[in-house]
Amino acid sequence: MAIDLILYLLLLLSISLYGIVSYKKLTIPFKALAITILWISLSEIAARVLARTIHNSSPTYHILCIFLYAGFTVTYSQLLTGARLKKGLLLSIIPFTILCIVNIIFFQSFFSFPSNTIVISYLLFVVYSLILFMQMLNAPKEVNIFKQGIFWFNIAMLVYSIITPLCFGVSNYLHVHKLYANLLNDFIEYFCFVYYATLGYAIYLDKNRYKMTLVPA
Amino acid sequence: MNLTKNDTDIYLILGSAILLLTGLTGFIIYFLVLYRKKQVLHLIEREKQALQFHQEMLNTQIEIQEQTMQTIGTDLHDNIGQLLSLTSLTLNSINITNDVKAQAKIESAIGLTLKSIKELRQLGKLLQGDQLIAMGLVEAIRHEVEWIERSGKYQVHYSNEGEFPAEWNKDKDLVIFRILQETLNNIIRHSSASQIDIKLSYLDNVVLLNISDNGVGFDATTNPAVKHGMGLHNIHKRAAIIGGELAINSSPDQGTTITIIVPYP
């Protein structure tokens, strides 16, 4: 197993472990985030196992996609204010799950990578994160923004949700034209590192939220 | 130079990627700048509010002191002044040749002097001002009620319900007490009431002060005093600065009920 893959899994497991250990001290949205990251870690391990045994890890991603959407949507629903918006977000999990099933049946089978549903979920995350940014602007906190877990979580989600579909597109192009894709694969790998590290940092900040100092005017 | 379809595609992808990343970076920088601006505005606003709150608290304190001074002035003139005048008249009218009558008048003068001393002591308590609030809202109101009753013009019924928290909120106590004073002033000046009911209750972290009278009342929906009258305007403002709410229920010849609800402590 490549060293970078081991490091990647170790990072995911450490964040998951940190999330579980500090679970009680986290706010509700970050509790949902900690559970989501734990699920991602387990799925990534399962994906590697499947890749080694049946040489196809796609089934894991079909299931992960649903849980990923549900986990992040619950996180957003807890972070966003407005009863109707919260309810709408939570209800959206149902049609999304149906969409995933339809995708498996008609478009991308259980053994193909579910890029359709993943791209759709990322597009929705972009919308959610923009709404959250707007909410943050309307009700600024007195804590330094770089010490706010909500900021790092949202920025990670926005950047990742925009860059990943772009990477899918480029990767697809390179694959179709049988071009050298190692550079892109490395980029995706390091990008995932940064993404999960940022989410971990967001959890860390949320846990230590009481120690934050106020910003001077 | 002829571009193949492959070249066009790769340029299109690269162009889109650069555009997207530039837009994303721009958005993040713009957000951070805007957030900082809003944060500063929010802090300034909060400081303004805090300053306004302190100013209002100071005004409240001054008003309570003024009210106290006014009560003392009235009492000195109407009560102690009268007692001392009567004492002086009694002492002046003593005829020392008539021992029996002189003795009776001296005893009467002593009685009047003792009564004056008692009244002065009562007045002294009122001068303590802030200490009145320090005794707690329940006691402070009881003290205020005693002064109203002394005039003999009003039948005042005061009751309190619920167990107040061990820790008092001095700022809120001060404002609630001032609201009570202002309301009682309004009753004395405008209502022609003979009966006043004051009920102070504490339930589920909320203080509820209910003051009602059997006076002339007014049309709460049309009377401009409700909106513009200095007293009521002040009461509204004061209730708001401590996060409270005010309800006025009144109609002509039906008396007036004022209810103040304040989250407490």
Image (cartoon, coloured by chain):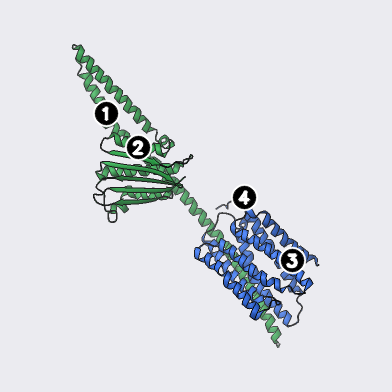
Q: Would you name the residue on which mark 1 appears?
A: B81
Whether residue B198 is visible, yes or no, is: yes
Mark 4 — residue? A211
Q: Is residue A186 above or below residue B224?
A: below
Residue occupying the point 61% across, 57% down: A148
Task: Identify the image quadrant of residue B113.
Answer: top left
The disc label shown at residue B144, or none: 2
**Which subunit holds the residue at mark 2?**
B
Q: Nearer the viewer, mark 4 or mark 1?
A: 4
Q: Give chain B's shade.
A: green
The residue at which mark 3 appears reads as: A45
Residues under labels 3 and 4: Cα distance?
Answer: 35 Å
Q: Nearer the viewer, residue B110 or B65?
A: B110
Marks 4/1: CA distance? 63 Å
Up the image or down, A100 lies above or below A7; here it is: below
Chain to which mark 4 belongs = A
Binning the other alpha carbons within 10 Å of mark 3 as few (below 14), some (14 to 19) or many (20 upward) gives some
Q: Are marks 2 and 4 on the same chain?
A: no
Helix, strand or loop at mark 3? helix
